[in-house]
Amino acid sequence: MSSHARHDMSDIHAGHDAGAAAGLWSQAISATLHCLTGCAIGEVLGMVLGTWWGWSNGATIVLAIVLAFVFGYSLTIAPVLRAGLPLGAALGVALAADTVSIAVMEIVDNLGVLLIPGAMDAGLTSWLFWGALAGSLAIAFVVTVPVNRALIARGKGHAVVHAYHH
């Protein structure tokens, strides 16, 4: 094979690799947006309820984390059930697809809110409370995208769910 032909073949291979890498990043962003949606619903609801009820910061954070997992898993389970899987199998798919992603997002998000001075005690009418929560979720999204990319590249995480989304 001539050096010119080898060069052309390596360009094709490199182009394929670049396309595959871009596809992985796109899938990771999509998976993380899905995760962010469930986490944000649960996180906001938990923070609002815990703050409204006057719960301690620890109890409020635990509620927010539990609700983030519940809503995150629910957003995965619903389409998988519509695809025809029984509840037990759908739950297994959701656990496999979302557990790591939600856990990373929740760790980063809650650390962010806790590290911003006064955010947890600011109250529901405060821009500090809402700004800290929104900013922490945004940072959690950025941190979680590469985690989801690594999982998808290994056939784990949201790669498990894609077979049921069609």
Image (spheres, rainbow, N blue to C red):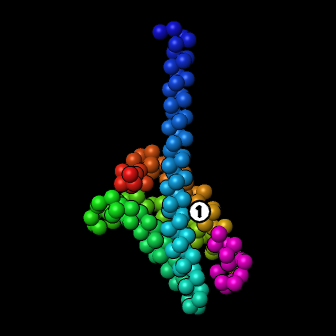
For mark 1, what is the residue?
140
Front-lying residue, 81 or 11: 81
Left or right: residue 139 versus residue 80 is right
Q: Position of residue 18 (x, y in %)?
A: 55, 34
Q: Is residue 80 magenta?
A: no
Q: Residues within 10 Å of mark 1 (few under 14, many from 20)?
A: many
Q: Is residue 130 magenta?
A: yes
Q: Is residue 24 above or below residue 117?
A: above
Q: Position of residue 22 (x, y in %)?
A: 55, 41
Residue 109 lies in quadrant: bottom right
Q: Is residue 22 above or below residue 81?
A: above
Type of the residue with mark 1: Ala
Farthest residue, direction bottom: 54
Identify the residue at image location x=69%, y=84%.
125
Front-lying residue, 86 or 12: 86
Residue 131 lies in quadrant: bottom right
Identify the residue at image location x=45%, y=51%.
151
Report if residue 94 is visible in the image: no
Residue segment shown in magenta: 120-134
Left or right: residue 111 versus residue 157 is right
